[in-house]
Image (cartoon, rainbow, N blue to C red):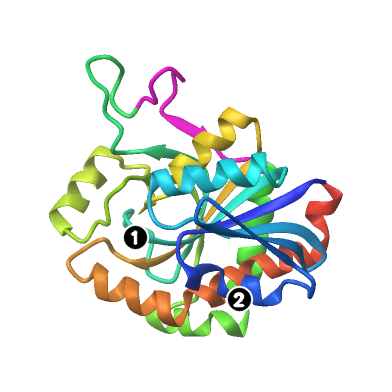
Amino acid sequence: MGRLAILGALHEEIADLLAAMDPGAATFRIAMRDFHVGTLWGTPCVIALSRIGKVAAAATACIAIQEFKASRVIFTGLAGGLHADVEVGDVVVASAVMQYDMDARPLFGRHEIPLLGRERFDADPALGRLLQDSAALFARSPAAMPAAGAARRPPKVHHGLIATGDVFVNDIEYAQRLRQALPEALCLEMEGGATAQVCYEFGVPFALLRVISDRADHAAKSDFTDFLVNLARVYSAGILAPLLQSGALRQA
């Protein structure tokens, strides 16, 4: 197995992962980003803060693949819940990702990525299954209890479509329009679609892991901020640790 890239848009989403890297990890600064290269729970990794949005995520994924020879990419972080079955504290692992704000009509179909002839990018099934299993372990652990209190039940792990756009959605009417237009979409975020497109073009398997921090409504800003500060780092490390410690990626 080559090196695994783990990317996140905000420091809190990757803080505990960085803290858990083995001593001797090296940091390389490229394009105003720090890439931390070393071993995480026995797995060779490069971890980087992408910053927010599709352009930032795409640039970071390109560097991780080109400069650090990442053979797989996992993007982790928070998201706004969209589907009625998804609640705050739940985990969503992408089966596919699409960019809901892409609209080059009449030259191309709505949501179609120009010149690629597709609206959605499928996540790697094997990597997705491993993430689902690891997330399910986390959901049953004591570390998940603070989130369980917020959701009034243990976190659920969902698998399905994730929608990406360069919009922080905190408008209930806008969210409702998206629900009607994208009934399959489980949640909204701002980086996964771009990361998926880059990985598709490079032929690199990817997975997208999102934790629901808010409901994309009028309270999204405060809910997101509270979850980011108090729980985001717990989720990222708590879900990824069992997967990396198991050696499953090294065996695949």
Identify the residue position indicated by label 1 in the image: 80
**Left or right of 129: which side holds 33?**
left
Percent x, y of residue 129 = 66, 50
Question: Could you tell me which secondary element the residue under label 1 belongs to?
Answer: strand
Percent x, y of residue 115 = 43, 17
Res 151 visible: no
Residue 40 found in image quarter = bottom right
Percent x, y of residue 203 = 65, 30
Q: Residue at x 33, y 53 (%)?
A: 83
Residue occupying the far top of the picture: 107
- Relative to residue 197, is residue 21 depicted above or below? below
Other residues around mark 2 within 10 Å, as few (<14) / some (14–19) / many (≥20)? some
Other residues around mark 1 within 10 Å, as few (<14) / some (14–19) / many (≥20)? many
Magenta extent: 112-125
**Magenta region, main secondary structure:** loop
Identify the residue position indicated by label 2 in the image: 16
Does the magenta portion include 113?
Answer: yes
In front: label 1 or label 2 = 2
